[in-house]
Image (cartoon, rainbow, N blue to C red):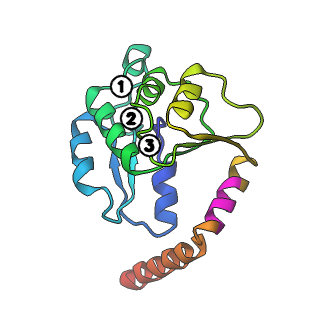
Amino acid sequence: ITTNFDHLIEESLRRYGFSDPKVISDKTRVGSINSSLGLGVPHVLKVHGDIFFKTYNAHEEISRLQPSWKKAIQRILSDFVPIVIGYGGNDLGFMSTLANLEQNTVPSGPLWFYRHNRPERHSVQQFVDRQSGHFVQGPEFDQLLLLIGSVFEITKYERRAEEQRAHQQAAWM
């Protein structure tokens, strides 16, 4: 789940061998999330749209999430543990949705990583507290992702990506 419009997440997934991540950036397509989660296909959910399509960035557009996004986020967070990295909680609509989830509906609670100072926003604290989550002071973003990658053995995904690139090159020859 991201509030960003760019394609960095999709590009990273492709880099590591996930050739066709499912990107949902339109509130009308949010309903398709439930039927495809957990099928081994990465999902990128862009709650504020996509830079090449429609974006939602005006105050009145982001001060409240659409009901379809709220429902999808509640569903996802009841099955998956959110790991928040590099986000200060500055999005009123998104954070309001998180902060107002029923207590302890996120399994194992969220992990909210920060580098120097814990996020000060009340909605961030409320979300982490209500879900029995944890704030974790960690290293800078790149180093943290390398550490996470070592835990999940990202090198096997690098090999998978290399195999796919070799297969694509062979197909072009």
Pointer 3 local density, CA inside 10 Å: few below 14, some 14–19, many at least 20: many
Secondary structure beneath dot 3 equals loop
Q: Nearer the viewer, residue 173 or 107?
A: 107
Check the image and report above or below for 99 versus 11.
above
Check the image and report above or below for 52 versus 145.
above
Q: Give the residue at mark 2.
A: 47
Q: Which amino acid, mark 2?
A: Val
In screen coordinates, is 5 left or right of 38? right
Q: Which amino acid, mark 3?
A: Val
Q: Give the residue at mark 3.
A: 106
Q: Are marks 1 and 2 in contact (CB under 8 Å)?
A: yes
Q: Is residue 148 magenta?
A: yes
Query: What whole-number distance in Å separates the C-alpha atoms at marks 1 and 3?
Result: 19 Å
Residue sitting at x 53%, y 43%? 110
In screen coordinates, is 43 left or right of 82? left
**What residue range appears in magenta?**
144-150
Give the mark, 1 or 2, whose residue is nearer the N terminus: 2
Give the mark, 1 or 3, whose residue is nearer the N terminus: 1
Residue 155: x %, y % from top left: 60, 75
Check the image and report above or below for 107 versus 54.
below
Quadrant (top left/top right/bottom left/bottom right) for the N terminus: top left
Q: Is residue 13 magenta?
A: no
Residue 20: x %, y % from top left: 35, 62
Residue 141: x %, y % from top left: 69, 48
The overriding secondary structure of the stretch rendered in magenta is helix
Pointer 1 local density, CA inside 10 Å: few below 14, some 14–19, many at least 20: many
Residue sitting at x 41%, y 78%? 168
Mark seen at residue 65:
1
Give the mark, 3 or 2, whose residue is nearer the N terminus: 2
Secondary structure beneath dot 1 equals loop
Q: Are marks 1 and 3 in contact (CB under 8 Å)?
A: no
